Image (spheres, helix red, strand yellow):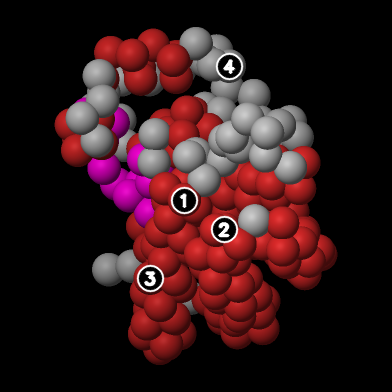
Protein backbone atom coordinates (compact mmCIF):
# COMPACT_ATOMS: atom_id res chain seq x y z
CA UNK A 1 0.00 0.00 0.00
CA UNK A 2 1.43 3.36 -0.99
CA UNK A 3 0.98 5.99 1.66
CA UNK A 4 -0.59 9.24 0.48
CA UNK A 5 1.77 12.16 0.93
CA UNK A 6 0.33 15.29 2.52
CA UNK A 7 1.60 18.86 2.84
CA UNK A 8 2.06 18.42 6.59
CA UNK A 9 4.62 15.64 6.18
CA UNK A 10 8.29 16.48 6.51
CA UNK A 11 10.58 16.30 3.49
CA UNK A 12 12.61 13.58 5.22
CA UNK A 13 9.56 11.39 5.85
CA UNK A 14 8.28 11.95 2.33
CA UNK A 15 11.52 10.77 0.70
CA UNK A 16 11.76 7.81 3.09
CA UNK A 17 8.23 6.81 2.02
CA UNK A 18 8.69 7.59 -1.69
CA UNK A 19 12.39 7.61 -2.65
CA UNK A 20 11.65 9.02 -6.12
CA UNK A 21 10.21 12.15 -4.52
CA UNK A 22 13.86 13.08 -3.93
CA UNK A 23 14.33 13.56 -7.69
CA UNK A 24 11.30 15.84 -7.93
CA UNK A 25 12.46 17.93 -4.96
CA UNK A 26 16.15 18.30 -5.87
CA UNK A 27 15.23 19.47 -9.38
CA UNK A 28 13.51 22.39 -7.64
CA UNK A 29 16.57 22.83 -5.40
CA UNK A 30 14.58 21.78 -2.35
CA UNK A 31 17.15 20.31 -0.01
CA UNK A 32 15.21 17.34 1.41
CA UNK A 33 18.47 15.81 2.67
CA UNK A 34 19.49 18.72 4.93
CA UNK A 35 16.10 20.32 5.58
CA UNK A 36 14.43 17.00 6.30
CA UNK A 37 12.51 18.45 9.25
CA UNK A 38 10.75 21.02 7.11
CA UNK A 39 7.24 20.23 5.93
CA UNK A 40 6.44 20.12 2.23
CA UNK A 41 4.19 23.12 2.75
CA UNK A 42 7.02 25.18 4.25
CA UNK A 43 9.40 24.15 1.47
CA UNK A 44 6.89 25.06 -1.25
CA UNK A 45 6.29 28.47 0.33
CA UNK A 46 10.00 29.08 0.71
CA UNK A 47 10.72 28.24 -2.92
CA UNK A 48 7.54 29.91 -4.20
CA UNK A 49 6.33 26.73 -5.83
CA UNK A 50 2.71 25.63 -6.21
CA UNK A 51 2.12 23.09 -3.45
CA UNK A 52 -0.68 21.30 -5.31
CA UNK A 53 1.57 20.48 -8.26
CA UNK A 54 4.31 19.13 -6.02
CA UNK A 55 1.86 16.95 -4.12
CA UNK A 56 0.35 15.67 -7.35
CA UNK A 57 3.74 14.83 -8.84
CA UNK A 58 4.98 13.08 -5.71
CA UNK A 59 1.81 11.07 -5.20
CA UNK A 60 1.98 9.90 -8.81
CA UNK A 61 5.22 8.06 -7.98
CA UNK A 62 5.30 4.53 -6.62
CA UNK A 63 7.05 3.79 -3.35
CA UNK A 64 9.62 1.47 -4.95
CA UNK A 65 13.30 1.99 -4.24
CA UNK A 66 15.63 1.52 -7.22
CA UNK A 67 17.29 -1.55 -5.79
CA UNK A 68 14.17 -2.97 -4.17
CA UNK A 69 15.48 -2.35 -0.65
CA UNK A 70 13.27 -0.62 1.88
CA UNK A 71 15.55 1.09 4.33
CA UNK A 72 12.71 1.60 6.83
CA UNK A 73 12.97 -2.03 7.87
CA UNK A 74 16.75 -2.07 8.35
CA UNK A 75 18.41 -1.67 11.74
CA UNK A 76 21.05 1.04 12.29
CA UNK A 77 24.03 -1.28 11.87
CA UNK A 78 22.54 -2.53 8.59
CA UNK A 79 22.01 1.03 7.35
CA UNK A 80 25.66 1.89 8.05
CA UNK A 81 26.85 -1.11 6.02
CA UNK A 82 24.40 -0.28 3.24
CA UNK A 83 25.63 3.35 3.03
CA UNK A 84 29.26 2.27 2.89
CA UNK A 85 28.67 -0.34 0.22
CA UNK A 86 26.32 1.66 -1.95
CA UNK A 87 27.71 5.19 -1.65
CA UNK A 88 31.17 5.40 -0.09
CA UNK A 89 32.73 2.80 -2.35
CA UNK A 90 31.22 4.41 -5.45
CA UNK A 91 32.49 7.88 -4.53
CA UNK A 92 36.07 6.68 -4.29
CA UNK A 93 35.80 5.24 -7.81
CA UNK A 94 33.76 7.99 -9.44
CA UNK A 95 35.38 11.21 -8.22
CA UNK A 96 38.89 10.76 -9.72
CA UNK A 97 37.41 9.61 -13.04
CA UNK A 98 34.99 12.51 -13.15
CA UNK A 99 37.85 14.90 -12.36
CA UNK A 100 39.63 13.91 -15.56
CA UNK A 101 36.46 14.52 -17.60
CA UNK A 102 35.87 17.91 -15.94
CA UNK A 103 39.43 18.85 -16.86
CA UNK A 104 38.82 17.82 -20.46
CA UNK A 105 35.61 19.83 -20.55
CA UNK A 106 37.35 23.02 -19.40
CA UNK A 107 39.96 22.57 -22.12
CA UNK A 108 37.10 22.68 -24.63
CA UNK A 109 35.29 25.56 -22.98
CA UNK A 110 37.24 27.77 -20.59
CA UNK A 111 34.06 29.58 -19.50
CA UNK A 112 33.26 26.51 -17.40
CA UNK A 113 36.28 27.00 -15.14
CA UNK A 114 34.03 27.94 -12.22
CA UNK A 115 32.42 24.49 -12.48
CA UNK A 116 35.87 22.93 -12.23
CA UNK A 117 36.79 25.00 -9.16
CA UNK A 118 33.64 23.97 -7.33
CA UNK A 119 34.09 20.37 -8.40
CA UNK A 120 37.68 20.18 -7.13
CA UNK A 121 36.68 21.56 -3.73
CA UNK A 122 33.70 19.25 -3.56
CA UNK A 123 35.79 16.24 -4.49
CA UNK A 124 38.29 16.85 -1.69
CA UNK A 125 35.52 17.61 0.79
CA UNK A 126 33.56 14.46 -0.06
CA UNK A 127 36.60 12.21 0.11
CA UNK A 128 37.71 13.66 3.47
CA UNK A 129 34.18 13.46 4.77
CA UNK A 130 33.69 9.84 3.71
CA UNK A 131 37.06 8.87 5.18
CA UNK A 132 36.10 10.50 8.48
CA UNK A 133 32.84 8.53 8.54
CA UNK A 134 34.49 5.23 7.65
CA UNK A 135 37.47 5.55 9.98
CA UNK A 136 36.09 7.51 12.93
CA UNK A 137 32.45 8.37 13.22
CA UNK A 138 30.75 5.20 11.96
CA UNK A 139 32.85 2.96 14.25
CA UNK A 140 31.90 5.26 17.18
CA UNK A 141 28.28 5.05 16.09
CA UNK A 142 28.42 1.25 15.85
CA UNK A 143 29.94 0.99 19.29
CA UNK A 144 27.26 3.31 20.66
CA UNK A 145 24.41 1.37 19.03
CA UNK A 146 25.84 -1.89 20.34
CA UNK A 147 26.23 -0.63 23.92
CA UNK A 148 24.95 2.93 24.46
CA UNK A 149 26.40 5.09 27.22
CA UNK A 150 26.27 8.77 28.12
CA UNK A 151 30.03 9.12 27.58
CA UNK A 152 29.91 7.65 24.12
CA UNK A 153 26.96 9.86 23.27
CA UNK A 154 28.77 13.01 24.41
CA UNK A 155 31.80 12.02 22.32
CA UNK A 156 29.63 11.35 19.28
CA UNK A 157 27.51 14.50 19.30
CA UNK A 158 30.08 17.04 18.01
CA UNK A 159 31.13 14.62 15.26
CA UNK A 160 27.56 14.24 14.07
CA UNK A 161 27.08 18.01 14.04
CA UNK A 162 30.26 18.45 12.03
CA UNK A 163 29.14 15.85 9.49
CA UNK A 164 25.76 17.58 9.20
CA UNK A 165 27.48 20.91 8.45
CA UNK A 166 29.55 19.23 5.75
CA UNK A 167 26.41 17.64 4.29
CA UNK A 168 24.87 21.07 3.90
CA UNK A 169 28.00 22.43 2.20
CA UNK A 170 27.95 19.54 -0.27
CA UNK A 171 24.34 20.28 -1.23
CA UNK A 172 25.25 23.96 -1.73
CA UNK A 173 27.88 22.95 -4.30
CA UNK A 174 25.20 21.25 -6.39
CA UNK A 175 22.93 24.30 -6.34
CA UNK A 176 25.95 26.27 -7.62
CA UNK A 177 26.41 23.72 -10.41
CA UNK A 178 22.74 24.18 -11.29
CA UNK A 179 23.23 27.96 -11.49
CA UNK A 180 26.29 27.60 -13.71
CA UNK A 181 25.01 24.87 -16.02
CA UNK A 182 21.41 25.92 -16.55
CA UNK A 183 20.30 22.93 -14.46
CA UNK A 184 22.75 20.60 -16.20
CA UNK A 185 21.34 21.46 -19.61
CA UNK A 186 23.90 21.89 -22.40
CA UNK A 187 23.33 24.53 -25.06
CA UNK A 188 22.67 23.56 -28.64
CA UNK A 189 25.96 22.91 -30.37
CA UNK A 190 27.89 22.29 -27.16
CA UNK A 191 30.49 19.55 -27.50
CA UNK A 192 29.66 16.06 -26.29
CA UNK A 193 32.03 16.28 -23.36
CA UNK A 194 29.90 19.06 -21.82
CA UNK A 195 26.73 16.96 -22.07
CA UNK A 196 28.61 14.00 -20.66
CA UNK A 197 30.01 15.90 -17.66
CA UNK A 198 26.64 17.56 -16.92
CA UNK A 199 25.02 14.13 -16.84
CA UNK A 200 27.68 12.74 -14.50
CA UNK A 201 27.41 15.79 -12.23
CA UNK A 202 23.67 15.35 -12.00
CA UNK A 203 24.14 11.67 -11.20
CA UNK A 204 26.55 12.74 -8.45
CA UNK A 205 23.97 15.21 -7.15
CA UNK A 206 21.35 12.49 -6.96
CA UNK A 207 23.68 10.02 -5.25
CA UNK A 208 24.92 12.64 -2.78
CA UNK A 209 21.49 13.87 -1.73
CA UNK A 210 20.11 10.33 -1.42
CA UNK A 211 23.21 9.39 0.58
CA UNK A 212 22.92 12.40 2.89
CA UNK A 213 19.19 11.72 3.32
CA UNK A 214 20.00 8.24 4.65
CA UNK A 215 22.52 9.66 7.11
CA UNK A 216 20.69 12.78 8.32
CA UNK A 217 17.04 11.82 8.10
CA UNK A 218 17.21 8.13 8.89
CA UNK A 219 20.44 7.05 10.61
CA UNK A 220 21.28 10.10 12.75
CA UNK A 221 17.64 10.92 13.41
CA UNK A 222 16.94 7.41 14.61
CA UNK A 223 20.02 7.29 16.83
CA UNK A 224 19.03 10.63 18.37
CA UNK A 225 15.40 9.62 18.94
CA UNK A 226 16.18 6.20 20.34
CA UNK A 227 19.07 7.03 22.59
CA UNK A 228 19.05 10.70 23.37
CA UNK A 229 17.52 12.05 26.61
FE1 LIG B 1 28.48 8.98 4.06
FE1 LIG C 1 28.02 11.92 5.36
On residue 62, which mark appears? 4
Q: Residue at x 55, y 58 (%)?
A: 111
Between the C-alphas of marks 2 and 3, the distance is 27 Å
| Quarter location, residue 11 | top left
Horizontal relation, residue 36 to residue 83: left or right:
left
Tell me, yes or no, whether the two marked residues, 1 and 4, touch with CB atoms within 8 Å: no
| Quarter location, residue 87 | bottom right
Between the C-alphas of marks 2 and 4, the distance is 37 Å
User: Dot 2, how many residues are within 10 Å of its Cα: few (below 14), some (14-19), or many (20+)?
Assistant: some
Q: Residue at x 58, y 16 (%)?
A: 62
User: Dot 4, how many residues are within 10 Å of its Cα: few (below 14), some (14-19), or many (20+)?
Assistant: some
First along the sequence among labels 2 and 4: 4
Q: Residue at x 47, y 28 (%)?
A: 24
On residue 112, which mark appears? 2
Q: Residue at x 47, y 46 (%)?
A: 178
Element on which disc 3 rests? helix
Element on which disc 4 rests? loop
Tell me, yes or no, whether the two marked residues, 2 and 4, touch with CB atoms within 8 Å: no
37 in magenta: yes
Determine whether 119 is above or below 4 in the image: below
First along the sequence among labels 1 and 3: 3
In this figure, which residue is indicated by the disc labeled 1? 180
Element on which disc 2 rests? helix
Element on which disc 1 rests? helix
Tell me, yes or no, whether the two marked residues, 1 and 2, touch with CB atoms within 8 Å: yes
Camera-side residue of 206 and 195: 195
Region rendered in magenta: 30-41
**Quadrant occupied by the C terminus:** bottom left
On residue 165, which mark appears? 3
Horizontal relation, residue 171 to residue 20: left or right:
left
Foreground label between 1 and 2: 2
Camera-side residue of 51 and 105: 105
Amino acid sequence: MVKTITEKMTLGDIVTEIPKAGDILRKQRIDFANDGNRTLKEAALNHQLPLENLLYEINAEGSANQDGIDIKYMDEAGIIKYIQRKYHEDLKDELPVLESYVEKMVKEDASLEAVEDIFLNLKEALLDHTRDEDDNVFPMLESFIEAPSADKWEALKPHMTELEDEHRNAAEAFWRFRDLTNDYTAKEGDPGIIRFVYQRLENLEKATLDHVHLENNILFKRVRETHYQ
